[in-house]
Structures are given as structure tokens and as C-alpha cells.
């Protein structure tokens, strides 16, 4: 006489189906000492809503013909989430987030706002999940659903990819040290600015403006790249290192 699922929340409320023979006319289904609510019954199955409980309990079905042999049902506590990393990423999704906590081994879904993703269970204390695409930039709640229930309380922020305009001034000496203003969009979460692949000192003035100081370079045009948590944007040949005069 199988039982499915064979585990559920300590708070009860799990829909459980018990299959077997001669089950019609079931008058009671016990989870340990507690009665479950019967919602459907045929000769080969009984569907019930589990009562609250804890630990492992025997489940029996009582019909006019007697009481069945017991099956085991495992009560699972609600999950606890201690944190997730990283806490932000591109609106298009696709990056991997790690969620830490306890009671995560039976996780079946992770919701980012209203969008669901299927996690990979690493252990009872850790999950990984590929972030689904967001509907818009901004924070969303993150919830984990397990056999023990659903736990909320974490937040993930979707960030739009940056765009970049023409740096000003567009040229400077190879020795570096030129103060350059970089226009664009979605600069708030900027992590790095590079000139020809070389990291530059920078300051985010606002979401549309970055001030950077060129590092030393070699003569010629180089790409200027801004990288944020939402992705990267490049001004191809956006700055030119000029040779100094000679007489």
C-alpha cells in the first residue's frame, strides 16, 4: 500500500494519496494519533489532507473491513534561509545564485518574484539555482519551497545592462592621468572601468555619468569598457593615447 508523497510539512496541509485494495468506504485515516481529512476515496485509493505533526508517524486506513497495515510518513520542518549570493544580476537572468540555510534538502522550487526556477540541492544547507529572466529591473522577493513549506525573506535585484556614450575628452597622453567623463546609462552598480583592458580609477557620479582617470597606455585608440552587475558596455576605440611632442 504505497503513500505519495511520503513526507510533508509539520504544519500539515499536504495532499497525500494512499493506494491499495479494498479501500472503499474508508472511515478514518490516522497519521499517528491524529485524524487526516479524507477528500477522495475509491476502492484502490484514499486521498487525504495531512494533519500537523512531527517526526515519523505511522499512517493507517480504517474501513468497515478493519484497519490496514501502517505506512511511514515523514514530517519535514519549514526551511530557513540565511542568505544568498550574489544578490544581484542581469535582468536577462542566466547567472547562478547560491542559497544557504537549513532544511533545504527537499527543495522543489525557488521563486524570484512570481517566476519559478528549479534548484539543484547541494546539501541540506545549500542550494544553487539559475536565475530566471526578470520582468523589469529592481528588487524581487526570493522564496524557497520544500516538503516542509515555503520560506520568504530574501531579496534579489535585477539590474539592466549598461550602455556607454562617447568619453570626453577622447584623447590624452600615454602617461595617463587624463580625467575623462563617460556618459551612458545604468552605471549605478559599476564594478570596473578599463582603458584598453587596463583598470582605471573611477567614480560613479550618478546613474548616467562616470568620472575616470586614464591609466598609462600606448599610442593609439583603445576600447573603454564599463562593467556593472548588469553586464558590460564598450566604447570601441573610445579613447586615443597620443604621443607627446618632440623638438
Image (tube, helix red, strand yellow):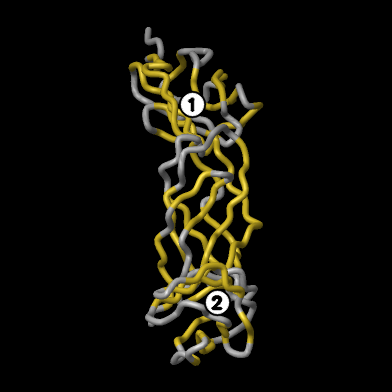
Instruction: Label 2: state its secondary structure.
Output: strand
Crowdedness near tag 1: few (<14), some (14–19) or many (≥20) residues, C-alpha within 10 Å? many
Instruction: Label 1: state its secondary structure.
Output: loop
Q: Is residue 211 left or right of residue 246?
A: right
- Compared with 54, 132 (above or below) is above
Residue 43, how many percent across, how many down? 42, 75
Q: For the image shown, how many numbered marks are present on the structure?
A: 2
- Compared with 237, 70 (above or below) is below
Quarter of the N terminus within the rendering: bottom left
Q: Nearer the viewer, residue 58 or 241?
A: 58
Q: Residue at x 62, y 62 (%)?
A: 151
Q: Quadrant of residue 190?
A: top right
Crowdedness near tag 2: few (<14), some (14–19) or many (≥20) residues, C-alpha within 10 Å? many
Q: Nearer the viewer, residue 9 or 177?
A: 9
From the image, tell me which residue sits under label 1.
214
Spatial separation of the CA atoms under disc 1 and disc 2: 57 Å
Residue 126, how many percent across, how many down? 47, 67
Residue 48, how many percent across, how many down? 55, 72
Label located before the other in sequence (1 or 2): 2
Q: Residue at x 49, y 48 (%)?
A: 116
Q: Is residue 59 visible?
A: no
From the image, tell me which residue sits under label 2.
76
Quarter of the C terminus within the rendering: top left
Amino acid at each position: 500500500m504505497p503513500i505519495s508523497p511520503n513526507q510533508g510539512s509539520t504544519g500539515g496541509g499536504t495532499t497525500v494519496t494512499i493506494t491499495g485494495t479494498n479501500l472503499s468506504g474508508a472511515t478514518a485515516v490516522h497519521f499517528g494519533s491524529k485524524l487526516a481529512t479524507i477528500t477522495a476515496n475509491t476502492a484502490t485509493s484514499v486521498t487525504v489532507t495531512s494533519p500537523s505533526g512531527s517526526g515519523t508517524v505511522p499512517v493507517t486506513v480504517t474501513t468497515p473491513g478493519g484497519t490496514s497495515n501502517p505506512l511511514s510518513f515523514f514530517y519535514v520542518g519549514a526551511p530557513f534561509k540565511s542568505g544568498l549570493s550574489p544578490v544581484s544580476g542581469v535582468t536577462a537572468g542566466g547567472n547562478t545564485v547560491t542559497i544557504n540555510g537549513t532544511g533545504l534538502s527537499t527543495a522543489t522550487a525557488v521563486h524570484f518574484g512570481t517566476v519559478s526556477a528549479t534548484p539543484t540541492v547541494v546539501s541540506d544547507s545549500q542550494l544553487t539555482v539559475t536565475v530566471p529572466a526578470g520582468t523589469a529591473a529592481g528588487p524581487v522577493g526570493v522564496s524557497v519551497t520544500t516538503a516542509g513549506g515555503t520560506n520568504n525573506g530574501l531579496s534579489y535585484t535585477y539590474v539592466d545592462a549598461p550602455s556607454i556614450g562617447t568619453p570626453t575628452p577622447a584623447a590624452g597622453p600615454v602617461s595617463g592621468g587624463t580625467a575623462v567623463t563617460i556618459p551612458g546609462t545604468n552605471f549605478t552598480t559599476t564594478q570596473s572601468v578599463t582603458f584598453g583592458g587596463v583598470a582605471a580609477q573611477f567614480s560613479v557620479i550618478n546613474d548616467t555619468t562616470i568620472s575616470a582617470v586614464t591609466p598609462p597606455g600606448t599610442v593609439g585608440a583603445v576600447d573603454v569598457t564599463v562593467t556593472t552587475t548588469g553586464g558590460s558596455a564598450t566604447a570601441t576605440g573610445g579613447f586615443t593615447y597620443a604621443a607627446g611632442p618632440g623638438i
